[in-house]
Image (cartoon, rainbow, N blue to C red):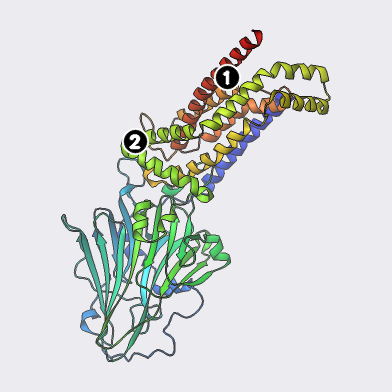
């Protein structure tokens, strides 16, 4: 009967796994086919400001009634009369981006050092896109009468060339898009790229050559569908990396506001500083306004079938521009990997986008230790092994208490077996006698459990470190492990981990009072854990395997020391 129940449990677990795999297959996003940027530009125009306003927060973005009205000339200046929409390509050592002069927004951003996969002809990851049913855009513009984005119109800017490249020896590259309105006010939208950086400075330079006083305000927004991209999906069981918006304000360092929250309750708040971002596995896109002024953050959503759109936006305060004067509005766009040092340099608290969850206070030191050790060994797998050794060394006092408790329990097993025979089925009486024996022999029956509970937060924190550390993405270890961030392709590490867990279990004493069903479940635990770990990143399995091997070595050493102490005590008693 007990064997049948165990078999049914295993069968149920296996069927659950098959159903889970089938669910993932049915619900994963359709693969995005590669097509030329130019084709997508011709077939599908970039999302316009009018579309942006469809999911904007309630309230008018037009200039308020007390601000002066701009009087327009009847003729359009020749400088912008013949402007033709085109794609402008800019390439640096880190980025290749495309800007659509119709609207003046980035429509793609490829990270040249990060590929979608490890295959030979893998494409660079494209964070921003607006094609094949996918939407992810970094939008920016100016509100105010006469501005390029006034009342949702789509302005076509002029540009001197359609290809730019950061030359060797240069530290920065500026790309200017120009537009002149009917009143002769010149708007220059400037994108500034830097060597060895994922941050792009975006600014509007307004030259007011009209006879009227102007007022403008800059907005920056991130607009995305709610579907993950194929290369960012975390395979298998376990906690998934966060996908969705986040923001920082003068009152709050870091807050997540996921897609579901936006749909249920649109966000609106005022702040004097901060940023908005959309996070995904290993990468982040963020807008950081520059300059000191009051600003508003809002987030809204719109359902469009499966891939409903969500937008998070930050709008700076109004600025007056006197006739004959110029004013600059600026913000920084970060589009790149979650490298803490780069994020910290870009904006205050942006490094918190590398989210280690509620155990961040454990995860952060582990990350710095991992980074420090990798700097010496230049191999992330070896660094994980060294981190494991350091953690096990720090937790050695707990391990010593645990394994000495196991050793004492093993010495008491003959007495426990005798009690079981004497008291038979009277479990209450037997429990009382065992507690008396534990007290007399000074043994804590929970002494072996407490150290395990202490180690679990470390394990969970390390899970998040390995999950969130982009440096581990596509990082090889040795032999068949060419990517520590994904599961072992041949399942060798999980099998070795399961074998080590089985050996550890055999080394631990078994309480004679344990129910036979419980004993069978405990015996099957290494099997369950092996199946569970098959889907974990290889780096995490490597940590747990090394943790088990070091634990076995520690238990052998501590038990041997304990037995020697017992022999000495026995000899002294005989004398």
The location of residue 69, given as percent across then percent down, is 37, 91
Secondary structure state at the residue bearing disc 2: loop
Q: Taking 403 as reference, is 69 above or below it?
A: below
Q: How many numbered discs?
A: 2
Q: Nearer the viewer, residue 269 or 181?
A: 269
Q: Which residue is mark 2?
A: 379
Residue 159, disc: none
Q: Taking 526 as reference, is 213 above or below it?
A: below
Label 1 CA crowd tier, 10 Å (few <14, some 14–19, many 20+): some
Q: Residue at x 71, y 15 (%)?
A: 414
If you read the primary sequence from the N terminus, does the residue marked by circle 1 or circle 2 appear first? 2
Q: Is residue 180 left or right of residue 151?
A: left
Q: Residue at x 75, y 28 (%)?
A: 435
Q: Nearer the viewer, residue 120 or 70?
A: 70
Q: Is residue 443 left or right of residue 204?
A: right
Q: Taking 397 as reference, is 94 above or below it?
A: below
Q: Nearer the viewer, residue 354 or 250?
A: 250
Secondary structure state at the residue bearing disc 1: helix
Label 2 CA crowd tier, 10 Å (few <14, some 14–19, many 20+): some
Q: Which residue is mark 1?
A: 562
Quarter of the image with the N terminus in it: top right
The location of residue 444, given as percent across then percent down, is 67, 29
The location of residue 332, given as percent across then percent down, is 33, 65
Distance from label 1 to label 2 (Cα)?
38 Å
Quarter of the image with the C terminus in it: top right
Does the image show residue 390? Answer: yes
Q: Nearer the viewer, mark 1 or mark 2?
A: 1
The location of residue 283, given as percent across then percent down, is 40, 53
């Amino acid at each position: 009967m007990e064997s049948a129940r165990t078999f049914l449990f295993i069968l149920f677990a296996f069927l659950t796994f098959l159903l889970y795999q089938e669910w993932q297959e049915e619900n994963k996003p359709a693969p995005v086919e590669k097509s030329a940027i130019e084709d997508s530009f011709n077939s599908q125009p970039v999302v316009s400001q009018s579309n942006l306003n469809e999911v904007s927060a309630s309230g008018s973005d037009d200039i308020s009634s007390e601000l002066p009205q701009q009087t327009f000339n009847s003729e359009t200046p020749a400088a912008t009369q013949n402007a033709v929409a085109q794609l402008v390509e800019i390439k640096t050592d880190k980025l290749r981006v495309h800007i659509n002069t119709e609207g003046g927004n980035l429509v793609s951003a490829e990270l040249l050092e990060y590929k979608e996969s490890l295959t030979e002809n893998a494409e660079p990851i494209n964070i921003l896109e607006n094609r094949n049913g996918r939407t992810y855009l970094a939008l920016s513009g100016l509100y105010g009468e006469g501005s390029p984005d006034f009342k949702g119109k789509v302005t076509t800017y002029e540009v001197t060339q359609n290809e730019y490249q950061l030359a060797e020896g240069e530290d920065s590259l500026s790309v200017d898009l120009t537009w002149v309105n009917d009143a002769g006010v010149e708007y220059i939208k400037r994108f500034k790229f830097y060597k060895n950086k994922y941050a792009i400075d975006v600014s509007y330079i307004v030259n007011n050559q009209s006879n009227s006083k102007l007022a403008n305000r800059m907005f920056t927004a991130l607009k995305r569908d709610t579907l993950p991209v194929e290369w960012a999906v975390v395979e298998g069981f376990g906690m998934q990396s966060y996908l969705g918006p986040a923001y920082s304000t003068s009152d709050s360092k870091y807050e997540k506001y996921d897609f579901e929250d936006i749909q249920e309750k649109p966000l609106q708040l005022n702040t004097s500083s901060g940023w908005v971002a959309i996070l995904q596995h290993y990468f982040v896109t963020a807008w950081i306004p520059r300059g000191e002024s009051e600003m508003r953050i809002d987030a809204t959503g719109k359902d469009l079938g499966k891939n409903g759109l969500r937008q998070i936006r930050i709008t700076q305060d109004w600025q007056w521009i006197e006739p004959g004067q110029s004013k600059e509005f600026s913000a920084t766009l970060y589009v790149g990997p979650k490298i803490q040092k780069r994020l910290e340099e870009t904006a205050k608290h942006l490094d918190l986008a590398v989210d280690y969850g509620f155990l961040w206070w454990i995860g952060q030191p582990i990350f710095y230790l991992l980074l420090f050790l990798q700097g010496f060994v230049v191999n992330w797998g070896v660094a994980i092994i060294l981190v494991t050794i350091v953690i096990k060394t720090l937790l050695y006092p707990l391990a010593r208490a645990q394994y000495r408790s196991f050793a004492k329990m093993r010495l008491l097993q003959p007495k426990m077996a005798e009690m079981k025979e004497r008291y038979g089925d009277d479990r209450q009486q037997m429990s009382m006698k065992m507690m008396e024996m534990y007290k007399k022999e000074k043994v804590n029956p929970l002494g072996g459990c407490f150290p395990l509970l202490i180690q679990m937060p470390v394990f969970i924190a390390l899970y998040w470190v390995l999950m969130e550390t982009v440096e581990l993405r596509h990082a090889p270890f040795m032999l068949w492990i060419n990517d520590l961030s994904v599961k072992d392709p041949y399942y060798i590490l999980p099998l070795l981990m399961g074998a080590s867990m089985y050996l550890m279990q055999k080394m631990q004493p078994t309480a004679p009072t344990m129910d036979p069903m419980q004993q069978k479940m405990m015996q099957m635990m290494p099997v369950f854990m092996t199946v569970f770990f098959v889907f974990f990143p290889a780096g995490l399995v490597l940590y747990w395997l090394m943790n088990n091997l070091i634990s076995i070595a520690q238990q052998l050493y501590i038990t041997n020391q304990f037995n020697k102490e017992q022999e000495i005590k026995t000899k002294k008693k005989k004398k």
